[in-house]
Image: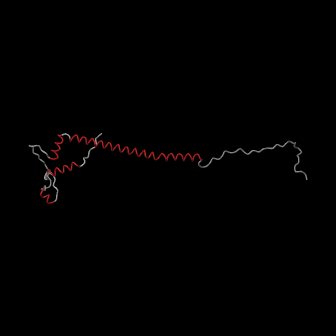
Amino acid sequence: MPSARRPSAGRSKRPVRAVRRTAAPAAAPAPRAGLTTRAAVLGLVVCALVVSAALPLREYLTQRGQIAQQRQAQAQAEARVAALQRQLHQLQDPAYVKAQARTRLHFVLPGETDYVVLAPTAAPVSAGKAALSGATVSGPESPWYSQVWSSVKAADRPVAVASPKR
C-alpha cells in the first residue's frame, strides 16, 4: 500500500511551522441587566437617611406651629392685661366711680332730683301683681335692692374687650 503521504513533486521541502491559532479578540462584556450591588447599597443608604430625617423634620414643623400659637395666645393675653390695667386705672379715679354710680345706680347728690324717662311700652305691672303672677319685676318698679343685685350680677359677667388697633 502506498503511503498516504506523498511528497508532491513540485514542492520543496520546507520545515513546517506550527501555526498557532489564537482565539478571536474578546468582545466587550455585555452590560448587566438590573441593579448592581453598589446601586442597591446606595439606594438602601438613601432610604435610611430619608426615613431617619422624616421624624425630626415632622417634630420640628409641629413645634414651629405650636410656637406660633403660643405667641398669638401671649399677644391676646397681653392685650387683655392692658385692657384690665386701663379699667383699673379708671376705677381708681373717684370722678369715674362717681359717674358710674350716678349712671348705673341712679345715685343723686343731696338736693338733686333724678328723673328717669321710660319709653312707652305695655302697661307696667305693679310689684304686688307681679308677685301674685310669679313674674319677676325689674326696672324702676322693682325695689332698689333688686336693682343693686342685678347690677352686681351684671358686673360679675366678663366684659368683651375689643382688640387694640395697630
**Residue 38 position in % (x across, y down):** 58, 45
In this picture, residue 21 sits left or right of residue 38: right
In this picture, residue 129 sits left or right of residue 68: left
**Residue 78 position in % (x across, y down):** 30, 42
In this picture, residue 109 sits left or right of residue 5: left
**Residue 166 position in % (x across, y down):** 30, 39
Which residue in the rendered view is the most extreme toward the right?
A: 1
Task: Determine the image quadrant of residue 76.
Answer: top left
Task: Determine the image quadrant of residue 109.
Answer: top left
Q: Nearer the viewer, residue 35 or 42?
A: 42
In this picture, residue 103 sits left or right of residue 7: left
Instruction: Give the image's coloring scheme.
Output: secondary structure
Which residue in the rendered view is the most extreme toward the left?
A: 111
Q: Nearer the viewer, residue 3 or 149?
A: 149
**Numbered circles on residues, count:** 0
